Image (cartoon, rainbow, N blue to C red):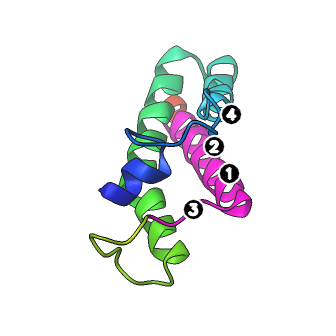
Amino acid sequence: MRAVRVLTGGPGSSADRPWLPGLPHATAGIATYFAFGAQACVTGLLLATLASFVIYLPMTALTLNGGRALAPDAPAPVLTARAVILLLALWTLTAWAGAALAAAAS
């Protein structure tokens, strides 16, 4: 969980990080409101957030660390620009797929 906290800019993050790191995610997620409605939008946002914290961020931390678990005393890996773009794309795809499924089910 330490890797997820560091990768998401939790307590202890540096001052040179942008103050709105989630703005692209929010924009991509809220765009589903206009296509599918409010209920589907919220469902898509919840599914994307859950998938991000349970699957995408831990897998990214493992990948950036060469497939090894993070040692307790080792610094967390730094997110590369490519990793940030990939995480945004996966999150956006999950939010849109979740919203589309929720809209189709209702």
Verify whether residue 48 appears in magenta. Answer: no
Q: Are marks 2 and 1 in contact (CB under 8 Å)?
A: yes
Identify whether 87 is placed above or below 28.
below
| Label 3, residues with CA under 10 Å away: few <14, some 14-19, many ≥20 | few
> How many discs appear?
4
Q: Which quadrant holds residue 29?
A: top right
Q: Where is residue 2? Give x, y as percent.
A: 32, 56
Q: Mark 4, mark 1: which one is toward the viewer?
A: 4
Identify whether 55 is placed above or below 44.
below
**Extent of the magenta region:** 76-101
In the rendering, which numbered label is found on residue 89?
Answer: 1
Give the Cα separation between the discs numbered 4 and 2.
Answer: 9 Å
Residue under label 4 = 24
Name the residue located 68 percent from the left edge and 26 percent from the top edge: 27
Residue under label 3 = 78
Left of 8 or right of it: where is 22? Answer: right
